[in-house]
Image: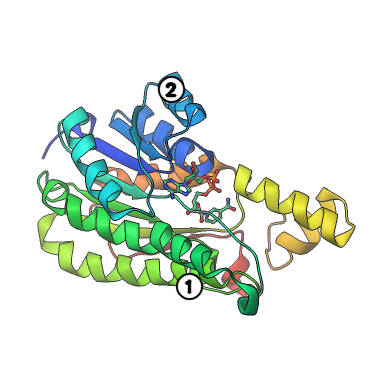
């Protein structure tokens, strides 16, 4: 057993929204934390402002996935907790869906989690308390029109989670997926603005009547709500939870 404060974590997409909240949560739980994100001045500033190690990388590129693992291990001395969080949304009818965008979305949200898990495997299994935590979505269970790439990637990520969990079980490495409903982040705020404009509704109406129509609790989650669940899954106490698909979905899938 090693103490949690000696562990090192890498959070992808860790300078915005849910990823930043997760990085800060793991940091406050005593882990050393690196955040991978696209190499932009703002991302570097956010990381530096929170004392997080910045790993520049574009997850559409295979070589950046390999470099990210090497960079994290070089900076933090190991890699015990991998949080595959980076993602983005593109909304378009399937018949018009841009093929390059499909490729990029599948790469960032499904292939990169596979590559990072593969490249980091030897490090993640070293402590006997390794964790892979995949941020999927309610769209890993259900579909919405015009989100073919997003829904496909998130369904796939749940399959990857379960398979990796079966392979990692005897090495003290757990692999779990977290499936939030809508969380108030830049990704969702842009969607609310777009939908309000195209539907001629107020932003409050879009939230309650469009986004949260199927939810029992008509309130957006905050990034910290997701981070709290990740904090538990990353903790030594969660050693027995693996292959789990954890819904934080406001009652969405209860019906
Ligand atoms: P966000 O836009 O605030 O953050 C996403 C981060 O991913 C950004 O920092 C972005 O730069 C990074 N990223 C995107 N493409 C990248 C690439 N090619 N290489 C490296 N980094 C890249 O979004 P968020 O809402 O915080 O979403 C985080 C994760 O949570 C995503 O996987 C998303 O699908 C999932 N999720 C979000 C919601 C929600 O309602 N916001 C709900 C369920 C699941």
Q: Residue at x 18, y 40 (%)?
A: 70
Relative to 152, does residue 137 appear above or below in the rendering? above
For the residues labelled 1 and 2, say whether their Cβ atoms are less than 8 Å apart. no
Relative to 140, does residue 187 appear above or below in the rendering? above
Q: Nearer the viewer, residue 208 or 156?
A: 156
**x, y percentage for residue 111?**
34, 63
Asked where in the image residue 213 lies, by quadrant, the reply is bottom right
Give the residue at the far right of this rendering. Answer: 200
Marks 1 and 2, how far apart at CA: 33 Å
Near mark 1 (Cα within 10 A), the count class, few <14, some 14-19 or many ≥20, is: some
What residue sits right under mark 2 in the picture? 50
Between discs 1 and 2, the one toward the N terminus: 2
Quadrant of the rendering where the C terminus is positioned = bottom right
Q: Residue at x 38, y 68 (%)?
A: 158
**x, y percentage for residue 235?**
29, 43
- Kindly tell me whether mark 1's CB lies below 8 Å from ligand 1: no
**x, y percentage for residue 211?**
71, 60
Label 1: element kind? helix
Relative to 117, does residue 49 appear above or below in the rendering? above
What residue sits right under mark 1 in the picture? 152
Please count the marks in the image. 2
**x, y percentage for residue 33?**
31, 32
Near mark 2 (Cα within 10 A), the count class, few <14, some 14-19 or many ≥20, is: few
Q: Residue at x 54, y 65 (%)?
A: 138
Quick check: can you spot residue 246?
Answer: yes
Asked where in the image residue 115 lies, by quadrant, the reply is bottom left
**Mark in the foreground, 1 or 2:** 1
């Amino acid at each position: 057993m090693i103490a949690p404060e000696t562990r090192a974590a890498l959070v992808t997409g860790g300078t915005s929204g849910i990823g930043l909240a997760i990085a800060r949560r793991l940091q406050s739980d005593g882990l050393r934390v690196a955040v991978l994100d696209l190499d932009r001045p703002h991302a570097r500033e956010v990381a530096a402002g929170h004392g997080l190690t910045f790993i520049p990388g574009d997850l559409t590129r295979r070589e950046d996935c390999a470099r990210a693992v090497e960079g994290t291990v070089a900076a933090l001395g190991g890699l015990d907790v991998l949080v595959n969080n980076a993602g983005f949304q593109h909304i378009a009818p399937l018949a018009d869906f841009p093929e390059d965008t499909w490729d990029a979305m599948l790469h960032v949200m499904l292939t990169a989690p596979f590559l990072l898990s593969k490249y980091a495997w030897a490090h993640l299994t070293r402590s006997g308390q390794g964790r892979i935590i995949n941020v999927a979505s309610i769209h890993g269970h259900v579909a919405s029109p015009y989100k073919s790439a997003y829904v496909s990637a998130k369904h796939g990520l749940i399959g990857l989670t379960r398979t990796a969990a079966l392979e990692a079980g005897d090495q003290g490495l757990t692999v779990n997926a977290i499936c939030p409903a809508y969380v108030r982040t830049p990704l969702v705020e842009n969607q609310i603005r777009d939908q309000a404009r195209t539907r001629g509704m107020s932003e409050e109406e879009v939230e309650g009547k469009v986004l949260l129509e199927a939810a029992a609790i008509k309130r957006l989650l905050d990034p910290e709500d997701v981070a709290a669940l990740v904090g538990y899954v990353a903790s030594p106490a969660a050693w027995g939870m693996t292959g789990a698909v954890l819904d934080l979905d406001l009652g969405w899938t209860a019906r």
